[in-house]
Image (spheres, helix red, strand yellow):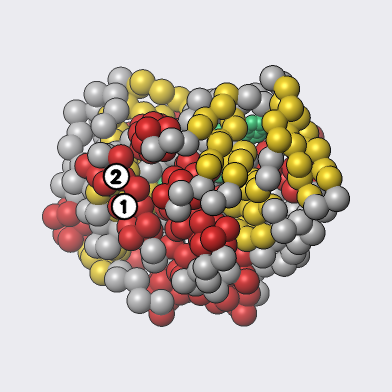
Amino acid sequence: MKKITVIGAGIVGIATAAYLRRDGHEVTVVDKLPPGEYTSSGNAGILSPGSCVPIAMPGILAKVPGYLGDPNGPLKVRWPYFPQALPWLFRFITSTNRKQIESTADALISLLSQTFDAHRPLAQHAGCSDMIRQTGYIVVYDTDQAYRNDALAWKLRRDRGVICEEVDAKGIARLMPALARNYERGVYLPEQGYVTNPERLTKTLARQFEADGGVILQREVLDIELGPQGPRALLTDAGRLEVETLVLCAGVHSGKFSAKLGDAVPLEAERGYHVTFSDPALALPMPVASAQNKLFVTPMEMGTRIAGQSEFAGIEAAPDYARADILVRHMKRMFPQVREVESTRWMGRRPSMPDSKPVIGAATKYANTYYAFGHGHIGLVGSAPTGRIIADLVAGRTPNIDIAPFRVDRF
Ligand SMILES: Cc1cc2nc3c(=O)[nH]c(=O)nc-3n(C[C@H](O)[C@H](O)[C@H](O)COP(=O)(O)OP(=O)(O)OC[C@H]3O[C@@H](n4cnc5c(N)ncnc54)[C@H](O)[C@@H]3O)c2cc1C
């Protein structure tokens, strides 16, 4: 059995630690925050094994001016940050050729189709299976034309076996009676699901990990000390911690550590926002997405949450809650009857790679180091499958999918 240190107690780090502990390793997780309190706390909660469509799709460049010019649009670039974001944005745009998006979709479906299969054993063991719902969700479009404009995305899903049932306005009303009658076309995806509280899920799995003998230390990792064989200690704000095997799951902060280990990666903070309506007077049977506005509305145990937006401003810039105001406007258009009691407004940093694929696998230089970061929009859904793969690699088992597309040195 190995002595393993995991940096990061977000959902990816905790799911990975849980799978490693199940194999009997001695596992310590190090995070400056309590488990699940960074990006993994405020997401939309969607568990979508069919999320195989890359964010960068053909034609996206032509849509950018429209997104940026629309006061209710889904995209914002803070111009002083633009020069820093440019290399990432360039790679993002150049990832949109047809061959590349087909191979990305293949890689993502192989990883994410295992979502429920990988999440359920962890949730069952931690006694929180009730948080995982497989209700399906519905994606709606204002017009039939808008739906047809997204034809390639739906083809990518259908070609990979994702069940996508077209519905008209009447079908939408039947599935989601509370939704305003603004939508001509929708797609119901019955196999998808959601988590009723992503932060509580992470915390519950973390508590179970500790009950199973795992250790969680609340410390900031300042640097990694390298020996001839690779990382040999973490230098933290509370002293030096020796490491034997290291797994890096530090979300958007992973890039500085992987660069230190000789694996520089294009990792960007794609900042998103949520507003949770704690007492919305709505009963939604499942989540609903507005494809054109790139947002999800999810029924959660804390109320109804609307989440979306992509803002490029760097990791540390202060939140701009005008982006959350946009979500509120969309919420009122979708659900005019919503009771406006807000409980949280939140900003989180998706750890996004320009080709929409996470980094999963071994470090290029050091045999004692593994990476699990860069999950962008799919960190909740991809966390447990990723954790299971890392546990396989550490144990010397062959993972049940081809992990070559997720290599750190693919750029
Ligand atoms: C608005 C929004 C909606 C989203 N909706 C969904 C969704 O519906 N479904 C989905 O699958 N995904 C969704 N996501 C994406 C998802 O939330 C992320 O991909 C996921 O949370 C990333 O998890 P992580 O564990 O990699 O990172 P994090 O949750 O960010 O965890 C990384 C951890 O590393 C720690 N850390 C970093 N640096 C250090 C250091 N130096 N020392 C110690 N600790 C350190 C941090 O404190 C943090 O706890 C959404 C994201 C946003 C912003």
Q: What residue would you read off at disc 1?
A: 121
**Residue 310 pos. (x, y %):** 57, 43
**Residue 329 pos. (x, y %):** 41, 33
Q: Name the residue rendered at 46%, 71% in the picture.
A: 400
Of residues 280 and 270, the one nearer the viewer is 270
Above or below, 331 relative to 411:
above
**CB under 8 Å between callouts 2 and 1?**
yes
Q: Which residue reaches farthest front? A: 1
**Few, some or many residues within 10 Å of mark 1 (<14, 14–19, 20+):** some
Q: Secondary structure at mark 2?
A: helix
- The answer to which quarter of the image holds residue 297 is top left
**Is 350 left or right of 287, judged from the image as shown?**
right
Dot 1 amino acid type: Pro
Dot 2 amino acid type: His
Q: Give the quarter of the figure containing the C terminus.
A: bottom right
**Residue 286 pos. (x, y %):** 24, 48
Q: Name the residue rendered at 52%, 30% in the picture.
A: 216
Of residues 342 and 262, the one nearer the viewer is 262
**Is 189 left or right of 348, judged from the image as shown?**
left
Q: Name the residue rendered at 53%, 41% in the picture.
A: 27
Respond yes or no on whether mark 2 lies under 8 Å from ligand 1: no
Q: In the image, which disc is placed on residue 125?
A: 2
Above or below, 403 relative to 2:
below
